Image (spheres, rainbow, N blue to C red):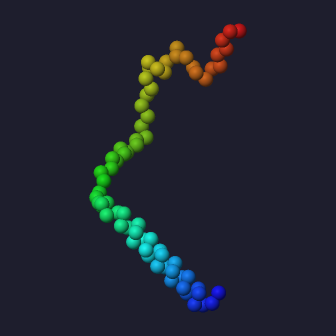
Amino acid sequence: MKKTDLALVVLIAAVSIGIAFLIANSFNIGVKKEGVDVKTVDQISGQVQEPSERVFNSNAINPTVEIVIGR
């Protein structure tokens, strides 16, 4: 390739990128740039509450114990 051919390819690529950029920006005519309200998260504390006696009691079923039915 000659230098003039390379320069022509670079020029055509640059013009094509510019035209593509202008066409892509023409689709964003109705877009408004406005702020959005975002919910914030409450701070997490290191305090642990005691579990409910109704659920965690000495008579509760332990799901980690293997139970065999039918033997």
Tell me what residue is drawn at x 57 percent, y 20 percent.
62
Horizontal and vertical percent position of residue 61: 55, 17
Look at the image and tell me in which quarter the C terminus lies. Answer: top right
Horizontal and vertical percent position of residue 30: 30, 60
Which of these two is toward me, 51 or 12? 12
Residue farthest toward the top in the current orientation of the protein: 71
Tell me what residue is drawn at x 44 percent, y 18 percent.
54
Look at the image and tell me in which quarter the N terminus lies. Answer: bottom right
Q: How many marks?
A: 0
Name which quarter of the figure residue 64 lies in: top right
Tell me if residue 18 comes above or below residue 49 in the rendering: below
Which of these two is toward me, 67 or 9? 9
Tell me what residue is drawn at x 31 percent, y 60 percent.
31
33 on left or right of 44: left
Which of these two is toward me, 61 or 48? 61
27 on left or right of 1: left
Residue farthest toward the bottom in the current orientation of the protein: 3
Residue farthest toward the right in the current orientation of the protein: 71
Tell me if residue 12 comes above or below residue 26 in the rendering: below
21 on left or right of 71: left
Tell me what residue is drawn at x 30 percent, y 51 percent.
37
Name which quarter of the figure residue 7 lies in: bottom right
Tell me if residue 66 comes above or below residue 13 in the rendering: above
Which of these two is toward me, 59 or 31? 31
Horizontal and vertical percent position of residue 60: 52, 16
Horizontal and vertical percent position of residue 39: 33, 47
